[in-house]
Structure formats: C-alpha cells, structure tokens
Image (tube, helix red, strand yellow):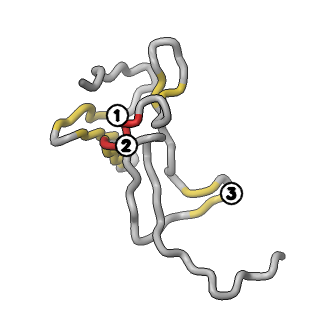
Amino acid sequence: MPEPLRGAYVERLSVAPVKSLAMQHPDAIALGPLGVHEDRRFFLVDDQGRLVNGVRHGTLVRARAAFDGAQLRIDRACARIFFGAPNHRERLPAAA
C-alpha cells in the first residue's frame, strides 16, 4: 500500500450527476470500486450521438442537475429544463 501523504487534506468534494453540468459540493461522498458513487452517472448527446461537453458548450455549467435515485431534475437560470425518470432516448428542449 502506498505511503500516506503527510499534511495532505481534502478541501472540497465536487460531484455532478450529469457530465458537464454545474458541480455540487456535498459534505460527504460514497466511494466504490469505480470511483465516486453517482458522479457523472448521466451525459448528454447531440443529434448525431456525440457527447455534449463543457468545452464545446460552456454555458452547460450554468445548469444544475439533481438525481434522487428515481427522478432526474435539470434547472438552468431559474427555469426547469427537465424533470422525470431518466430515459436514454429522451430529447430535451434546446437551451436558448
């Protein structure tokens, strides 16, 4: 096992239920063999099936997602974009 880092500490935890949307900073997280539980569980794709990310669409980071295990909610600038059970074929309205 590697030697622990002396003087190292975690300043803040960051997760996002949907890749490229706003980061959330919980007080605690669950770690599993594949990393942080529920972090980036979902992602967005465009009409051609390509991954939509913050590099090409920087305004995505203004949208905030929440997932309670059954319902996914995406809010942006005081407007609800999506709320419901996630569906891999669901089309969301284009953000203005």
Q: In the rendered structure, find residue 33 and report the number of the disc placed on it.
A: 3
Earlier along the polypeptide chain: callout 3 or callout 1?
3
N-terminal-most mark, 2 or 1: 2
Q: Is residue 91 left or right of residue 43?
A: left
Q: Would you place residue 48 above or below residue 74 in this image? A: above
Left or right of 35 on screen, residue 3: right
Residue position marked by numbered label 1 in the rendering: 85
Name the foreground residue: 50 vs 27: 50
| Dot placed on the residue nearer the N-terminal end, 3 or 2 | 3
Quarter of the picture holding the N terminus: bottom right
Mark in the foreground, 3 or 2: 2
Q: Amino acid at mark 3?
A: Pro
Cα–Cα gap, marks 2 and 1:
22 Å
Contact between marks 3 and 1 (CB within 8 A): the answer is no
| Spot occupied by residue 89 in the image (x, y as percentages of width and height) | 43, 19
Q: Which of the image's four quarters has the C terminus?
A: top left
Q: Is residue 73 depicted above or below 1 in this figure?
A: above
Residue 67 in the figure: left or right of residue 51: left
Classify residue 58 by image quadrant.
top left
The residue that mark 2 highlights is 61
| Amino acid at circle 2 | Val
Label 1 environment density (alpha carbons within 10 Å; few <14, some 14–19, many ≥20): few
Real-space Cα separation, disc 3 to disc 1, in angstroms: 26 Å
